Amino acid sequence: MIPQGFRAFFLVVLLGFSSFAGAAIDFYRGVVPVKSQSTQQRERAAKQAFAQVVVRLSGSSRSLELDAIRQAQARALKYVVQFQYVALDDPEFLAEGYTEQISLQFSPVSIRKLLMASDKYWPTNRPSTLVWLVEDSLDYGKQFVSNDIAPEVMKGFVHTAAERGLPLTYPLLDLQDQMRLSADQVWQLDDEAILVASQRYNADVVLVGRFSSTSKGEYLATWQFFHRGDSRVYDSRNNDAAELGAYALNPLADYLGNRYAIVPTEEQSPAVVMQLSGISSFANYRAALDYLEKMAAVSLLQLSAVRDDTLLLSLGTEASVERFVSVVALDGRMEQQESVGDLPAWQQTAQGTQENPLRFRWLR
């Protein structure tokens, strides 16, 4: 069953969807049902909403176990910048005595500062995930799943995507898709066919799911995701169609959060040296610097030199060089260039140094 606080947040998210393909995520908002507008109810709701936001912005529910996070959660209202009440008309909530829900907006600066000081922070620039789903049913055999065919399953995906901060997209399942990929190929987890059909959507991550239900109502599923040459396969068993989304997306969110979250260190932020070419105008120059300065992974930006259309930059960052490069790749605004030099890779100086700077070309 979906927890009360997240169920309320889920209902609000659904109101903003005209379809199940893609949606803006309000990363710093939590929504919780309440039985009154009393101070006690508001404080309780703030703690629950705080937990929603922390999990979404850290990339892991384990963050809630840290002492610093627990202490901050006890004072959750201090992190709230705005809240409002909205009437409820959901029968399930009404039966439990809830009459309205409270939507709480938390301070992005304060939440980020808290996570960077005590745990880790996953920036809101998230990889997009394309979801292919196939069900093997007794009545229809293997078929692609859409909102028309399995609304409870799709609602579960929407809920968990909002809960974990994962932007999802879904295939059109039009003639072009059907010519390139069949339900049988998805069921067989045909990697090559799946990835070829997915190229059309230009997603950062491809998630594939196949599931069936037993005569006792148990759902048996296998999931696989692909991301930048990496792949994971995992299984799930559960008794509720609405929970399939959680079993599919939580492992993916944990994986992506671990890969892209910024982990602070006790040492001073190290400098990463970058050589950025393609700066052919002042507009490009200003756009590139603005982009880098606003990156969550960058704490300091210094221009060291300019030559023709190329800038030499020194960036303070708490992310590793590999993680910084991965974050930049998500935006598509800069293209990484190969390092130049005749030395074999094992004899070259580490990337991101003055002797061997990261090389990028500005695209837009």
Image (cartoon, grey):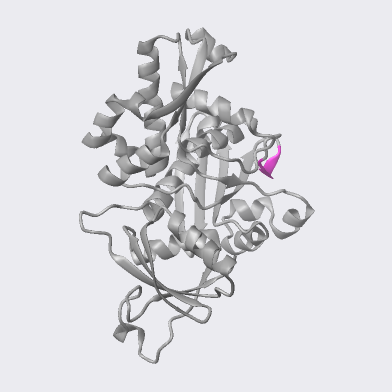
Instruction: Give the main secondary structure of the magenta stretch.
Output: strand
Residue 236 lies within the magenta run: no
Q: Residue at point 74% right, 54% down?
A: 178
Q: Residue at point 28% right, 64% down?
A: 270
Q: Residue at point 48% right, 37% down?
A: 246
- Residue 177, x across and y down, in percent: 72, 55
In-image side of 183 versus 160 (left or right): right
Q: In the rendered image of this protein, does residue 103 appear above or below residue 360? A: above
- Residue 109, x across and y down, in percent: 39, 41
Judging depth in this view, the residue of 169 and 137 nearest the camera is 169
Residue 144 lies within the magenta run: yes
Judging depth in this view, the residue of 28 and 294 nearest the camera is 294
Judging depth in this view, the residue of 77 and 173 nearest the camera is 77
Outermost residue, front side: 282
Q: In the rendered image of this protein, does residue 196 appear above or below residue 123? A: below
Quarter location, residue 42: top left
**Which image quarter is the C terminus in?**
bottom right
- Residue 363, x across and y down, in percent: 58, 69
* Residue 60 visible to the viewer: no
Q: How many marks?
A: 0
* Residue 205 visible to the viewer: yes
Magenta segment boundaries in residue numbering: 140-145
